[in-house]
Image (cartoon, rainbow, N blue to C red):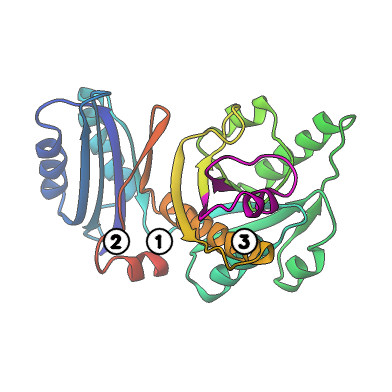
Amino acid sequence: MTHHVLTVQCPSTRGIVAAISGFLAANGCNITDSHQFDDPLTGMFFARMTFQAETGAARDALREGFAPIAETFAMDWAIHDASERMKVLLMVSNFGHCLNDLLYRWRIGALPIDIVGVVSNHMTYQKVVVNHDLPFHQIKVTKENKPEAEARLMALVEESGAELIVLARYMQVLSDAICQKMSGKIINIHHSFLPSFKGANPYKQAYERGVKLIGATAHYVTADLDEGPIIEQDTVRITHAQSAEDYVSLGRDVEAQVLSRAIHAHIHHRVFQNGNKTVVFPASPGSYASERMG
């Protein structure tokens, strides 16, 4: 048996689930997990199904057979091989907590991706990356050379076959051109405060204002800085007795956790963009371990 993931989004109408399940049954496939969402505000339907196929049912044949159904319902769809690992390019500047966390999760198999390289505008984490037997690429970025630097970045994406870029606290703003070209394929992480603190030392600002909750937001990158569709968020409670250093430590911890969860959802095709929002289907009970191995 081979394992696949079918993702579908299309205008909502009657008969979509029946058409999908009927096709899979007719082609010797067994649905093992299914999630769907019908958004009454946008009129869009979203579905993710995992299924087992008989060895003789090749993915290309399934795609060819499903195409007429997809056309009937105007679907944006894909059939993914659950055993294929997504190729991911990491980017980092001078804060390494997210990078180190992702490398550890990758090394122990908790984050089943193929890291094709790490890009940085500094040399701070070259040794860490090389010690993991991964390619390290320094691309310095200045106001004068930004077009050339981004051309080098896109060349790396093409050469490595990267399907996802993760900004693991990469502190350079990407151009609108890259954001558009890689739409839905760049994930960023940043702190979340109420009220909002921007600029230098946001955790110090939060400490000085007595913030009681700090958190992190992982989102897709768009031309609007830090305003792309949100994938994952979390918070941690702070008390009056904690120091500014505690704010930083706790903040970095929640950033690393939120980023890894967002990547996990993306690589397993559980995230759908729905206008300025996302639909994120959960990892079903019992499926998280199998996803880790997939």
Classify 24 as above or below 225.
below
Q: Percent position (x, y) of residue 96?
A: 71, 62
Q: Residue flagged by tag 1: what amino acid is it? A: Ser
Q: Quadrant of residue 106?
A: bottom right
Q: Is residue 11 left or right of residue 111?
A: left
What is the number of the mark on residue 247? Answer: 3
Task: Give the Cα distance between marks 3 and 2.
Answer: 47 Å
Q: Is residue 134 above or below residue 119?
A: below
Q: Position of residue 20 (x, y in %)?
A: 16, 40
Which label was assigned to residue 83?
A: 1
Q: In the image, is residue 61 above or below residue 250? A: above
Number of numbered discs on residues: 3
Query: Is 82 colored magenta in this rendering?
Result: no
- Do callouts 2 and 1 mark residues in contact (Cβ within 8 Å)? yes
Disc 1 is placed on an element classified as loop
Is 134 situated left or right of 123 in this image?
A: left
| Residue topped by disc 2 | 2
Asked whether 213 falls inside the magenta stretch, the response is: yes
